[in-house]
Amino acid sequence: MTGPKQHAQTPSPMETAAAAAEFLAGQEITTTECRRCGTQISGIHGRYSCGSCGWTNHWSEGHSELPTGDDDPDARP
């Protein structure tokens, strides 16, 4: 027989809002023309994907470093 189930503590709405605000404060929305069809598109930190034609720029063309696998809170050891 096992003991009672342990439930993960759910963050409060205030904690969730604070975490979201902190994340969004670090985001830079950038805008350019799609290299394939010319549509004006927006992305985050210079990474773009066009909703009209499907063009996507290479991940290395962005303005910031991408997180590593070690930054993933859901990564398994």
Image: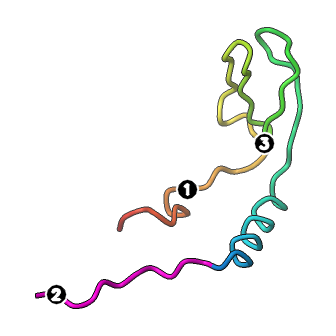
Q: Is residue 33 magenta?
A: no
Q: Kindly report the distance in space between the C-alpha atoms of the residues bearing marks 3 and 1.
A: 17 Å
Q: Residue at x 68, y 18 (%)?
A: 55
Q: Residue 44, which numbered label?
A: 3
Q: Which residues are magenta?
A: 1-11
Q: Earlier in the sequence, mark 2 or mark 1?
A: 2
Rendering coords of residue 39 (x, y %): 85, 15
Seen from the viewer's position, the closer of residues 10 and 61 is: 10
Q: Nearer the viewer, residue 15 or 5?
A: 5
Quadrant where the image shows the N terminus: bottom left
Look at the magenta stretch and give its main secondary structure: loop
Identify the residue position indicated by label 1 in the image: 68
**Which numbered disc, 3 or 1, marks the residue closer to the eye?**
3
State the residue at coordinates (80%, 66%): 21
Q: Give the answer, above or below, for where 45 lies relative to 33.
A: below
Element class at badge 3: strand
User: As drawn, which residue projects farthest toward the top?
Assistant: 37
Residue in view at x 45 percent, y 79 percent: 8
Mark 2 and mark 1: Cα distance apart in space: 37 Å
Left or right: 53, with 3 as reference point: right
Q: Is residue 14 left or right of residue 9?
A: right
Which of the 4 image quarters holds residue 31? top right
**Image disc number at residue 2:** 2
